[in-house]
Amino acid sequence: MDTGRKYNYLPKLRLLLNEWSDYYEKKGNFKKAYELRTQQQLLTDSIIGIQNHNRILLYDARYQSEKKENMIRQLEQESKVQELSSNRKISLIIC
């Protein structure tokens, strides 16, 4: 299972656990089928947790990017206002 996590094979591993559980259930080895089904459920929970974590990271990255873009726009606007103000002062001094 650690190898599956290392190489991101978790969904495939989950399917294999399901197939093996079905196999042992058909053979009448309910204890082994139950163990594998339990592992499959734990793996499913892990996959969901990883997916949720990745979504949170993605949303945070988007938020941070948007926040920086807004800050850049605001600074550009402030710079334009200062430039216009400076030009106006120069014009008033010249006149």
Image (cartoon, rainbow, N blue to C red):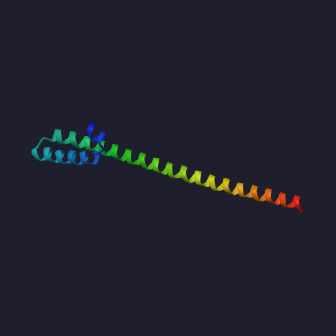
Q: Residue at x 30, y 44 (%)?
A: 8
Give the image quarter of residue 5.
Answer: top left
Locate the N terminus and report the quarter of the image it occupies. Answer: top left
Name the one closer to the observer, 51 or 20. Answer: 51
Q: Residue 14, position in %: x, y?
A: 25, 46
Q: Residue 33, position in %: x, y?
A: 18, 42
In the figure, is residue 56 to the left or right of 77?
left
Q: Residue at x 21, y 41 (%)?
A: 36
Q: Is residue 14 visible?
A: yes
Name the one closer to the observer, 33 or 3. Answer: 3
In the figure, is residue 72 to the left or right of 31?
right
Q: Is residue 2 above or below residue 75?
A: above
Q: So how many labels did they put on this image?
A: 0
Of all residues, the one furthest to the front in this rendering is 94
Name the one closer to the observer, 32 or 18. Answer: 18
Give the image quarter of residue 83.
Answer: bottom right
Q: Is residue 1 visible?
A: no
Give the image quarter of residue 21.
Answer: top left
Locate the C terminus and report the quarter of the image it occupies. Answer: bottom right
Q: Residue at x 31, y 46 (%)?
A: 44
Of all residues, the one furthest to the bottom in this rendering is 95
Q: Residue 92, position in %: x, y?
A: 87, 60
Of all residues, the one furthest to the left in this rendering is 27
Q: Residue at x 54, y 51 (%)?
A: 65
